[in-house]
Image: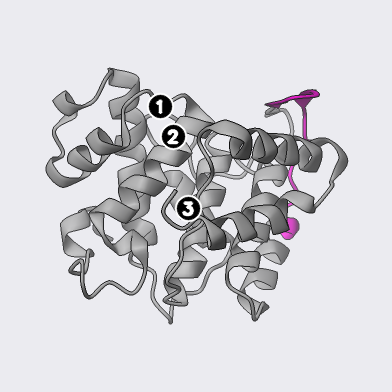
């Protein structure tokens, strides 16, 4: 499959999902990178990088590596159409595109002896070895759901908490969730807040989900995206 964004973008006016525009995709990747991976480049420069592929518009090599990975993974996700089967293999294929900034074995589900951890406001969340059947269930539930934004938010949260891969789990989860929205030609994307009280509420909610399996963040994130589509 091609990892060239020029082959899959629709025109700005003809796009059915905001991720099929450079501006919309830049917004998502900037927000993911800033909130999850300390991206220091601006949203405007992220957009310029997507348009030109020129790493000199970015702040640092880590930013260039991160956005290159996200660009390649996004290109795969944007090939999703109504006939695409969103299953565990599809999620693994997203993670496999994160070759510069993720795990030593991108795209492969963790096995015994390959621990990962996530920092939360309460301390370190250390999930056990993931059960591949749970990832299968996550994807089947999302495919069966009659909702869009809530189903995408729930998919993100469940994959992120499962931590199926050695690294890049939140990035993979967020791109997968948006793949569901792309498949359904939703006029919305699922992004995360990057500043202020909204960011604090999101990070606390995500920490509560990781540590205590409190699902409140799922509905909150879905509603935030519906009411703040351009923030």
Q: Badge 3 is on which residue?
A: 175
Secondary structure beneath label 1: loop
Marks 2 and 3 sit apart, C-alpha to C-alpha, by: 12 Å
Marks 3 and 1 sit apart, C-alpha to C-alpha, by: 17 Å
Query: Which mark's residue is nearer the viewer, 3 or 1?
Result: 1
Q: Which residues are magenta?
A: 118-134
Q: Which of pointers 2 and 3 lies earlier in the amino acid sequence?
A: 2
Q: Are marks 2 and 1 in contact (CB under 8 Å)?
A: yes
Q: Residue furthest top?
A: 60
- Mark 3 surroundings: few (<14), some (14-19) or many (≥20) residues within 10 A: many
Query: Residue 29: horizontal and vertical position, in percent?
Result: 39, 43
Marks 2 and 1 sit apart, C-alpha to C-alpha, by: 5 Å
User: Residue at image x 42%, y 29%?
Assistant: 101
Q: Badge 2 is on which residue?
A: 33
Q: Badge 1 is on which residue?
A: 39
**Left or right of 194 in this view: 54:** left
As displayed, is residue 55 above or below residue 158? above
Picture colour scheme = one colour
The answer to if 120 sits in the magenta stretch is yes
Quarter of the image that includes the N terminus? bottom left
Query: Residue 55: horizontal and vertical position, in percent?
Result: 18, 28
- Mark 1 surroundings: few (<14), some (14-19) or many (≥20) residues within 10 A: many
Residue 104 visible: no
As displayed, is residue 230 above or below residue 200? below
The quadrant holding residue 110 is top right
The quadrant holding residue 137 is bottom right
User: Residue at image x 37%, y 69%?
Assistant: 17
How many marks the image carries: the answer is 3
Residue 174 visible: yes
């Amino acid at each position: 499959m091609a990892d060239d964004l020029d082959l899959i973008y629709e025109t700005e006016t003809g796009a059915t999902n905001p991720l099929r525009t450079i501006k919309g995709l830049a917004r998502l990747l900037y927000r993911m990178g800033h909130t999850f991976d300390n991206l220091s480049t601006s949203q405007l420069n992220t957009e310029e990088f997507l348009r030109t592929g020129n790493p000199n518009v970015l702040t640092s090599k880590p930013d260039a590596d991160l956005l290159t990975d996200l660009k390649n993974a996004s290109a795969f996700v944007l090939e999703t159409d109504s006939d695409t089967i969103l299953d565990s293999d599809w999620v693994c294929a997203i993670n496999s595109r994160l070759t510069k900034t993720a795990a030593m074995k991108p795209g492969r589900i963790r096995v015994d002896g390959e621990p990962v951890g996530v920092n939360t406001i309460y301390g370190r969340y250390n999930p056990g070895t993931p059960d591949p059947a749970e990832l299968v269930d996550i994807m089947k539930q999302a495919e069966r759901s009659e909702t869009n934004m809530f189903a995408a938010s729930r998919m993100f949260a469940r994959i992120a908490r499962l931590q199926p891969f050695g690294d890049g789990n939140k990035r993979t989860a967020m791109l997968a969730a948006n793949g569901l929205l792309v498949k359904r030609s939703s006029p919305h994307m699922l992004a995360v807040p990057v500043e202020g009280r909204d960011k604090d509420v999101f990070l606390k909610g995500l920490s509560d989900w990781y540590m205590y399996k409190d699902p409140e963040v799922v509905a909150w994130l879905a509603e935030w995206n519906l009411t703040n589509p351009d923030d």
